[in-house]
Image: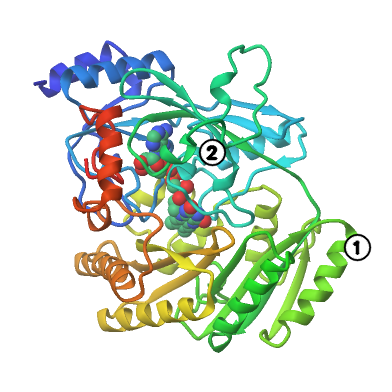
Amino acid sequence: MYSISTLEEYFLGILPAMAISMAPKAAKENLTEYPAPNILAELRPTSQEELAAILALAKKEGLKLYPISSGFNWGLGSKLPVEGPAVLINLNQWKSIEVSEELEYAIIGAGVTQKDLHDYLERHQLALKFPLTGSSQSTSILGNILDRGASAFFHRRQRLLGLEILLPSGKWLQTGLWHFHKTSSSPPPIYYSAGLGPDLNGLFTQSNLGITTRAIIQLQPQSSGILFFADFQEEQLTPIIQKLRKLRQGNMLNEGILLTNKNDPRTTEGNPFDYNGQWTLIGSFSGSTSLLQFLQTELSLQLAQYCQKIEFVSSSSTTSCSHPYQEVLRDLYNGCPSDYSIQTMAKLQQTSVQSAHEVDTNKNFPGMAVALLAVPFHGPSCLELMELIYKISLDMKVRPFYNLASLDDTTFEGFFRVYFDRNDPEASKNAKKWSQRVLQEAAEKLAIFPYRLSTEQMALFCQNEEDAFWQTIKEIKNSLDPHSLIAPKRYNLV
Ligand SMILES: Cc1cc2nc3c(=O)[nH]c(=O)nc-3n(C[C@H](O)[C@H](O)[C@H](O)COP(=O)(O)OP(=O)(O)OC[C@H]3O[C@@H](n4cnc5c(N)ncnc54)[C@H](O)[C@@H]3O)c2cc1C
């Protein structure tokens, strides 16, 4: 068994001193104010050799390694491991980007952020983009994909073509069709995500089976499109979702859809954050000029009876819009990320942030506890869930915020959250209890389950020894990682 000082010596044998932080205080800070497990060190390797040497050391010394790509998993524990003692492996320096313009894909290192990719494409004058999340421009693309995050327009998960992974055995694995490509002189002909044989891309997302260093992602050509913004009242929520379902089935709306209440820090006007029954529907469609004209007319007709007003904004316009969020979303549609969400969130507590790094460390930045649910794309189910959350919130005296963002044709991401004052321990405790209660009651009463969990919420849904699903995941883990070196208990019994 190691002592802390010998451990530091071992690390210094592998990495330069600047790539090692022993007992890192900042890594423990998180905007949900979860108590941090013991973090022995944060290591920032920059090469495959360093990473392999860390893994070999972990095997020898029984260290538990928790990989992160940028560590801004806000609301879900940020950089925290599920349990300690742990060593964080931060791959935020892995910034390689290669693009195949012909096949419209990018091979990105784990640390490539939304902004890095956007800047690269712009610098190389490539008319390509990748679906963006509403989180900060400094969040990694890979970390978000590995946690199966949600993007604002278009859907991200389906665009993962391959992963490069260091397995606990020390072997390097490439998924999809990537492993067939042996020469490094030409870009691999990658376009088909399922590959041949079992599809391993899914196995390495929301899992603890390896350390992912690179990914191949399918880019999209820049396109002309129109964004629409439609305000409506809560009574219309059910019929409007049913209508959207029909429109999607009729192939009229096959890009992302976002339904948000208007008191959301991003959509509010003049900062009233109390829920007033007002909602906004946001979406987009793309195509030729005549198709855009047709869809705009048709959507105006189809949605008119539900909405107070509908605004259309061309993706190529450069004029200012009626609300700043519309401009931010126009940029997101065009592949240009921003920090608007965290900047507006800061306003909840009359503070401000200059960069993503302050979100976890600045105690005046609002705290956030989340319940992230896979909600059926079905009006009555959405309403039932909202009513349940409203009841729980009333009972617990918290103010909930709701977003529904399409994850695919059948599912919304339910991004339910409460904000709290991080300097108030009672408020912090209550917010976390609220998120737990929402997850539990949604599952028990409505059979609506989470699609993503925080480090503390893992135990609620991933620890059922009787469930053949988790038993199978455990067996896979035992076979690939018999010493449980990588991220123990993350989406796994072990
Ligand atoms: C205001 C606000 C808005 C947000 N909007 C969105 C949104 O629109 N969509 C969304 O999805 N999220 C959103 N989030 C949540 C979060 O900020 C993002 O999901 C963010 O992208 C996750 O952080 P990251 O990219 O730094 O990933 P990381 O924290 O680096 O990774 C997430 C997890 O994936 C695993 N992992 C990461 N890298 C590796 C690796 N190399 N190998 C193996 N496992 C790894 C780890 O378990 C890690 O904990 C929002 C948060 C806030 C506060």
Horizontal and vertical percent position of residue 261: 52, 76
Q: Specify whether 267 is left or right of 490.
A: right
The answer, for residue 449, to whether it is visible in the render is yes
Which residue bears the numbered disc 2? Answer: 113
Q: What residue is rendered at 61% in x and 13% in y?
A: 184
Q: What residue is rendered at 43% in x and 72% in y?
A: 401
Q: CA distance from mark 2 to mark 1?
A: 35 Å
Q: What residue is rendered at 48% in x and 32% in y?
A: 110
The mark lying in front, picked from 2 and 1, is: 1
Is the C terminus in the top left, top right, bottom left or bottom right quadrant?
Answer: top left
Mark 2 crowdedness (10 Å alpha carbons): few <14, some 14-19, many ≥20: many
Which residue bears the numbered disc 1? Answer: 290
Coloring applied to the structure: rainbow
Q: For the residue labelled by badge 1, is the local secondary structure a helix, a strand or a loop? A: helix
Q: What residue is rendered at 36% in x and 77% in y?
A: 389
Tell me if residue 381 comes above or below residue 313 in the rendering: below
Amino acid type, mark 2:
Thr
Tell me if residue 238 comes above or below residue 259 in the rendering: below
Q: Nearer the viewer, residue 195 or 228?
A: 195
Amino acid type, mark 1:
Ser
Q: For the residue labelled by badge 2, is the local secondary structure a helix, a strand or a loop? A: loop
